[in-house]
Amino acid sequence: MSFAALAAQRKLFGALGCIALVLVLAALVDGMITGGLKDPFRLDLLPGQSIKLSEQMPRGAERLEDIRLRASDPRISLRFEETFSGFWMGGTLWRAEAILAPNLPVGDYSVAVFHHNGTAADPPQAFTLRVHPDARALQAASGSLVTRTLGLSPYLFAVYLLGLALLPMAASFVLSRKIGQTLRSQRMSEIYRSMASPEGQQIYFCPGQGHGLAPGSLVEVLDERGQGVVGTAKVTKIIREDILAVMQDGGHVRPGALARLLPD
């Protein structure tokens, strides 16, 4: 396969990889925005589902026996499970489970925490359970664009995309190796870096072993397609297999242009 065809394929796979990474970033942003805007005391559910509830122990309460959970509808079963220490903010938290009856009508229901003597928790602790008719309605109620569109968590979607992004990256790597081999067979090499200097634009390329270049040698510089000569460059330094050369006559090129070794 020709250099031009290989280069076109690598450019395509590189673009696909970039698109996948941009989508990964967008999914992560979507998840963070959704999490930041979501009311932690509003929970979306379906009839028959259960959910874990957790909050700080109210002031004046030390044990689960000191507090009670009350639901606005008797078809919501509630039970405390345990107390535990908070990871980030410390303190003691309680954990409970709310179980919705399968025949619970669509609507909003409340679950609140009270002290054993019937007074409301201070500060107030009240959860709103919004019950939806079906999975489609539950999905549409999500604050995440990814979830509303695909039915997936934005973070899970980002993981899937990251795995897909590795495929075009691997393809680009393999094609780069093939391009390097193809160019070396034609005594050419890609310019991977260029920078300005008082002597002229400096270019860097790696023609591989046995290049036969020495300080003072001249190389032709071709365009990115390898079809037209855009100038010449003089070798100034050799660092193992990497060559540093300076463009002559004020010529300028971008990374991706080609350096061609002149016949001995």
Image: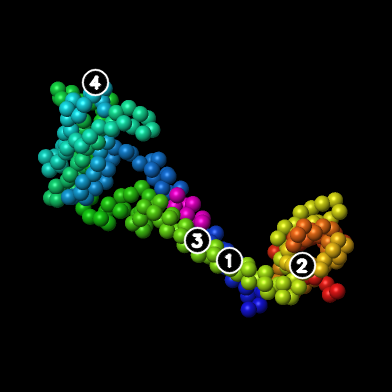
Mark 3–mark 4 Cα distance, whole angstroms, equals 53 Å
Question: The disc labelled 3 sits on which kind of residue?
Answer: Ala
Q: Sort mark 2 into few (<14), some (14-19) or many (20+) by Cα contacts within 10 Å.
A: many
The residue tagged 2 is 259
Question: The disc labelled 1 sits on which kind of residue?
Answer: Ser
Question: What secondary structure characterizes most of the magenta part?
Answer: helix
The residue tagged 1 is 172
Q: Which residues are magenta?
A: 21-28
Mark 3–mark 2 Cα distance, whole angstroms, equals 31 Å
Q: Is residue 127 visible?
A: no
**Disc 2, disc 4: CB below 8 Å?**
no
The residue tagged 4 is 60
- Point out the tag, 3 or 4, that comes first from the N-terminus: 4
The residue tagged 3 is 165
- Point out the tag, 1 or 2, that comes first from the N-terminus: 1
Specify whether residue 195 is painted magenta.
no
Q: Position of residue 61 (x, y in %)?
A: 23, 23
